[in-house]
Amino acid sequence: MVETIVLLSSGLFLGWSLGANDAANVFGAAVGARMIRFRTAAAVCSVFVVLGATISGAGAADTLGRLGAVSALPGAFAVALAAAVSTFWMGRLRIPVSSSQSIVGAILGWNLYTASATDSSSLVRIVSTWAACPVLAGVLAVLLFLMTRWLITVFKPHLLRLDHMTRLGLLLAGAFGSYSLGANNIANVMGVFVADNPFSDKSVFGLFTLSGVRQLFLLGGLSIAVGVTTYSERMMRTVGTGLARISPVSALVVVLAQSLTLFLFASERLEQLLDGWGLPTIPLVPASSSQAVVGAIVGISLLRRAGLRRRMIGGISLGWLATPLLACATSLILLFFVDNVFEQEVARPQRFRSDAEVVGEVERLGLPAVKLAEFMGRERTNALRMSRELQLSAEAGPAWMPRGSGGSPNLPDKEPEKKLSYLERVFRSDVQEDAEADAVNGGPAVHPEP
Amino acid sequence: MPLFQSSRVVENQIDEFFDKVGEGALVFDEGVRAYMQDRREEFDHAIGRIDRLESEADKLRRDIEAYLYGHSLIPEHRGDVLGLLENTDNIIDTAKASLYQFSVEHPDIPEQYRPMYVELAESCCKCVEALLVGARAFFRDVGAVKDSLYKVHHYERQADELSDRLKRDVFDTDLELARKIHLRYFALNVERVSDRAEEVADRLAIYAIKRSL
């Protein structure tokens, strides 16, 4: 138990630093503009971050898990610590940091160190989100700003009533933003521990069962809440005036746009809804609240032709490039130390097999043509090599997901890349963590560890 | 809606404050007219009314300020709102002081100049009324503020011209210098009300720009 807590401590540290920094993105403008007291903001933020993390944290965590399933707790410790140190360091340099970028960089470091395959489609999806997130937040902010301005022009509320409504709106949007922050960013804090989750399912007073993953997310949510309560006040008071001076109504628009952006990248229900309607889905990816806030403020400032501190934007953009690189390098160094100095297992060996059962499953699903005969009876331990061989033998183009998107009942209808990644998962025989992930996703595990 | 009840109370207080100032301007106009038409009783009545209105406006202003600061409301515009209220309050103070001067000094105004004083007071009153339209718009429809501010400047200029003409006419006569100076002093005394209104209008224009940003 003590060992588990020690190994989780890096994730809790990351959660604390996320709470200290990112809560300012949600409530900073409101507290900085003296519209909401810090105590109120901290209390609301803490409660809703924990709720968001526990209730809706699974979606983004799953995508992060696909990027690289950190399969051993000491490895996850090093990865989370690398992300936390990078976040803290960049914060010390007064560069707005993204915990999402830190953790992705750190996971890539783990993949490199352990010769694990990086799921290129997940990586592309995450990196493209980094570009899409501020743009989407900016567009949403502009639309919301125009709508708010129109409403104010039409209904002409009294200045005092507008003030009251703005306060109420800031509080509600802040609560929504905190929920979205918890739902989306818990993946950054605890995502790396999911693959080797130390918690088991527990019944809560016989009322409902709290799964191991939810317990993990609850713990992560609490660490974020502690960060919010203990260390976010200074950040909250300074944010909002750094990039451009914004009014309380603009602050409300910024918080709403940021919250909506994070929610769009975290809502499994929305994804299911869009999928059900046959519309393109929004990827469930841990997006950065800092990027969303910057995008929203820049959007409003451009619309109003208000003065932007261009130098600061340059610094922030540079930080967005530097953070994942720094986290990746730190992760490599820490993993080396954990592996060689402390002699801890940073990754579990992976095995891939093909047998009659696998062939049967492949045929049942009608997966793309792969020369299965080449794989029959053979076992692989190097994911990169396995991936390369599979890609060479497949006609459906390259795609590799260590944990795949298996378990989805409507998988055969999905595109060939997903089928191929599913195939790889079928091949893989050491995927007991998938059973847990699938339990979170609501789908059955197809090929758990016997 | 109970949610906005406290805000509604202050909204009403602000409206009431502007009502008091507007009524004060009308009473000032009536007072000057009553003095010029030698209706002493009505003049004294006007003095009593403006005195009461001024102290009621003061009380309302203090209550509003205390509420805004006590509840940390409209942090972005609180200073502007307080500035607006205090300067608007100065208008009724000036009007009251002006009527009191008539009451204390009993200026002997020749018959031919009396209509000009009445007209001057009327312009001042219109100037204050136009300002109050803008001041109310500041709270509800900031875009409409400038629509009333040009009227303030128009009536203030009109008051300036009337006052100037009055002073020139007075100094063109063979009246004693002391009396000329006394008459000029009362022209300035009445005109000061429109000057105060214009000062507030200038501030209001800035506040409106700040609010629309």
Image: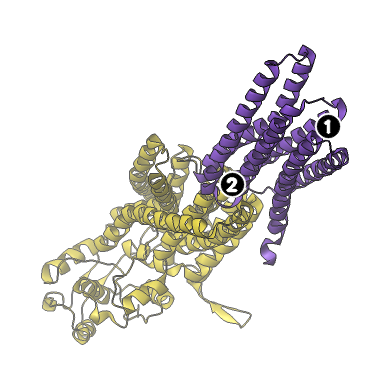
Chain colours: A yellow, B purple
Residue A21 point in image, percent of width and height:
51, 48
Residue A378 makes an appearance in the image = yes
Q: How many marks?
A: 2
Q: Chain of mark 2?
A: B
What's under tag 1, amino acid-wise?
Tyr
Residue A165 point in image, percent of width and height:
59, 58
Q: Which comes before the other along the chain, label 2 or label 1?
A: 1
Q: Nearer the viewer, residue A149 or B93?
A: B93
Q: CA separation, marks 2 and 1?
A: 32 Å
What's under tag 2, amino acid-wise?
Phe
The quarter of the image holding the N terminus of chain B is bottom right
Task: Look at the numbered discs 2 and 1 and tell me whether their residues touch, using CB distance below 8 Å.
Answer: no
Q: Residues within 10 Å of mark 2 (few under 14, many from 20)?
A: many
Same chain, labels 2 and 1: yes
Q: Is residue A255 shown above or below A354? A: above
Q: Secondary structure at mark 1?
A: helix
Q: Is residue A405 shown above or below A102? A: below
Give the residue at x 47% y 69%.
A56
Identify the residue position indicated by label 2 in the image: B138
In the rendered structure, find residue B100 and report the number of the disc placed on it.
1
In the rendered structure, find residue B17 and report the number of the disc placed on it.
none
Q: Residues within 10 Å of mark 1 (few under 14, many from 20)?
A: some
Residue A312 picture quarter: top left
